[in-house]
Image: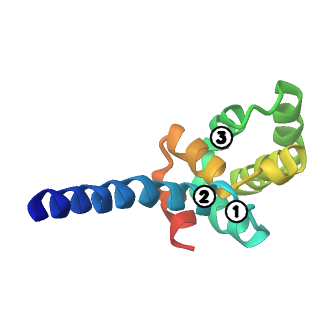
Amino acid sequence: MPFVYYLFKYFCVKLHVHLFADTSYNIQYGQTLVTPIQVTSICGDVGADWKYLAAQLKLSIADISNIDADSRDSREKAYNVIEKWLKREGIEATIGRLINALEEIERKDAAQKLLSM
């Protein structure tokens, strides 16, 4: 009987750690809003891939064209893409969503930079 009790307790602890470890990570990044410092820090990393990021963040073709026409270089274009997304999404513009978009366009360097901030 004591062995069964300890075995049960062991599996409950393992299950708890497994269930709540992922949840806390997702909550941390899933509910944390993107800050201006974070935006500025990754724009250079996004660089020439700013159009892919814009598409991944579901900006309209008109928005992408306006950003392209109104911005000087790719860093500024990336900044304007993220700013447009932030304004549109409001409290839904979380670090988790931005990290997912960056990973989808293969900019894991920028995603990693956000994770390390």
Give the residue displayed 22% in from the left and 62% down from the top.
10
Disc 2 versus disc 1: distance between alpha carbons?
8 Å
With respect to residue 81, does 110 lie above or below? below
Where residue 86 appears, as percent x and y from the top left, is 83, 51
Where residue 18 appears, as percent x and y from the top left, is 36, 55
Q: Tell me the tag on residue 32.
A: 1
Residue in the foreground of this view, choosing between 17 and 70: 17
Residue in the foreground of this view, choosing between 94 and 79: 94
Q: Quadrant of the C terminus?
A: bottom right
**Three-letter code for the amino acid on which mark 2 is drawn:** Ile
Camera-nearest label, 2 or 1: 2
Give the residue displayed 72% in from the left and 67% down from the top.
40
**Three-letter code for the amino acid on which mark 3 is drawn:** Leu
Residue behind mark 3: 53
37 relative to 89 in the view: left or right = left
Where residue 27 appears, as percent x and y from the top left, is 60, 58
**Three-letter code for the amino acid on which mark 1 is drawn:** Thr
Q: Secondary structure at mark 3?
A: helix
Residue behind mark 2: 27
Nearest to N terminus: mark 2 or mark 3: 2
Nearest to N terminus: mark 2 or mark 1: 2
Answer few, some or many: residues within 10 Å of disc 3's Cα (few below 14, many 20 plus, some between 14 and 19). Answer: many
Nearest to N terminus: mark 3 or mark 1: 1
